Each structure stands twice: as C-alpha cells, then as structure tokens.
Image: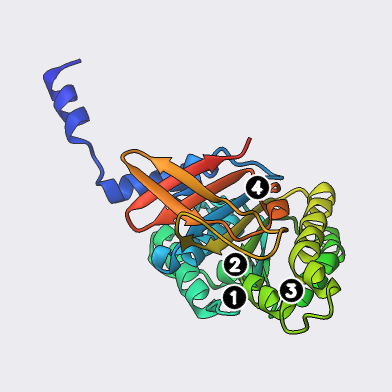
Amino acid sequence: MEKGGVKAWIDGDETAHDMLRRISAVRSTLLVPPLHRVPLRLGNVVEIVGPSPSAKTLILIQVAISFVLPREWNGVPYGGFDHSVLFLDLDCRFDISRFSQMLTHRIMEGNAIGDCDKTLYDLCMRRFLYARCSNSFEFLQTLKSLHYRLKREKDHGVGVHLLLIDSIGAFHWVDRASVFLSPKETNRKKLFLQSVSEAVVQDIKKLLQEHPMLVIATKSVIFGNTYSTTSNEVNRCSRNVTRNPQQIQYREYMPSVWQSLLIFLIYGAPSILAVLCYT
C-alpha cells in the first residue's frame, strides 16, 4: 500500500457520528445499548433493572422505534426491523409525545433533506400498539386478550414481534399491602402475591408459544443486602451482579416464578452496566 493510501486509510473519510449512522442503517440486527451486548432472539424474556434515573423507559422507546421503522423507505436506509410493537404501560406515565418526537428525529436524521416523511411517520405510529393497565387485574385481562388482538393484527398482515412491559413490578407493593387489609381473608394473600404472578407467567408463556416474540420488561431496583418479608412466596435473597471492579447488590422483590421466566437480566445505571444470563 502506498503512503498516500495508508494516510487516507488512517485519516478516514467520515466522522464518528457519520460512522454510527451508517452502521445503524446497515446492521439492522443491532439493538440500542445496552441490549446490543446480549444475543437476543424471539421467545426470550429480558428484564432491565435500574434506579429511577437510569432511562429504562427511554431504552424501551428507542427499541420500539427501531422495530417500527422499515429497513428501507423510498431508497433511504433506516435500519429498522419493519415490525409492529406492543407496549404495556403499567406505570401509567408513558409520554406519547416523547415517542413521537424521537420517532420524528430518527426519520429526519435518515432523510437526506432533513424533512419528516409524513407517510412513513403515520405508518410507524400505526405499528406502535399501546395499552395501559392500572392494576393487576387489568394487566391479567390484557394478557388474556392479547392472543385475539395479535391474531387480528396478523390476519391484516401485521406481525408483532416485540412486547414491552413498563414496569413489571408496578403493582407488587400495592398488591402486597392489600393482603393485610383483611387479615381474616387468608385466600387474598395467595391471590395477590403468588397466584397473580403465576397467572402472568403462564399467560406470557402461552402467548410466546402461539406468537413468538421478544419480551423486554423494566423493573425499578431496591438497593440493599437482604430482603425480609412475611410472605413465603417471595424470594428471600438479594442477587449480586458483578462487573469488576464494582459489585452491585439489590433486593429482589419479584416472586421466583417470574424470575424463572427470565433469560437475561440487564442492570443499568448512569455509570454501571452489568448483564446476567440465567441459562
């Protein structure tokens, strides 16, 4: 290689920003961080754990946008998955205007003229399916009705390959508190703690059997070394996720039946990233 060729190769002909845009358009299977570090496939259930300011919902929005965008539109590569997404909002704090702004930005970023293609925008918004649940019973009802909803979408040529749940532990403490409102009703304890979790897990398993998809759920973290509870149904251990030279300890409060469903756990914080594989 001549000197000029070597210098040109070292200098490069694009900025880091241009390189990232090019790779994101070509490598459509590359998910946003931190999910890009995990070998995900349809049927996997992933949990993203982190404190409140760790942008868990923002990660879900970015993943959703990557899924609803097409691989290519009018000759412009967007690097999307070209599929529909179902977002279950258990926190009841999802901001659809934020999703719209980020989607518009992605479309304008890929467009050479810097304009937002209204037709593409409308297509992506139609692919984003949203449901809000305000308690465990609504969550269970939604899961049980998803089979018919997804089948209807599939009959119309729309395949849903991603289920997002934000956040899976939203009703845990409310359900736990309701156990002690009526001490004489011992059945309520099993209903709100173990049985509800078992029903959720069974419905998700049935859903994945008939409609293979990637499931990503978020969960707020509770720091500490130990976890004590009067309920035997809840796992009594705290899990250590290690990423040298730091060690993260947090309290696991979700029942073990939910933990058994997970394939990967991703701990995200402003300065820490750790991935735990359950297999």
Query: Could you tell me which secondary element the residue under label 4 belongs to?
Result: loop
Residue in view at x 79 percent, y 58 percent: 198
Q: Residue furthest top?
A: 1
Residues at marks 1 and 3, CA–CA distance in whole angstroms: 12 Å
Query: Could you tell me which secondary element the residue under label 3 belongs to?
Result: helix
Q: Read off the residue under disc 4.
A: 262
Is residue 149 at least partly visible in the picture? no
Choose mark 1 or mark 3, whichever is in front. 3
Q: Residue furthest left?
A: 3
Asked whether, in this view, residue 93 is left or right of residue 196, the answer is: left
Residues at marks 2 and 1, CA–CA distance in whole angstroms: 6 Å
Residue in view at x 51 percent, y 79 percent: 97
For label 2, the crowd category at 10 Å Cα-Cα, with few meaning under 14, some 14 to 19 and many 20 or more, is many
Question: Residue 136 — which label?
Answer: 3
Name the amino acid type tagged 4: Leu
Residue 279: x percent and y percent?
63, 35
Determine whether label 2 and label 4 are within 8 Å by CB: no
Q: Earlier in the sequence, mark 1 or mark 3?
A: 1
Question: Residue 91 — which label?
Answer: 1
Residues at marks 4 and 3, CA–CA distance in whole angstroms: 20 Å
Residue 181, above or below 238 = below
Name the amino acid type tagged 1: Asp
Determine whether label 2 and label 1 are within 8 Å by CB: yes
Choose mark 2 or mark 4, whichever is in front. 4
Front residue (pair 126, 131): 131
Q: Read off the residue under disc 2.
A: 166
Residue 186, above or below 31 = below
For label 4, the crowd category at 10 Å Cα-Cα, with few meaning under 14, some 14 to 19 and many 20 or more, is some
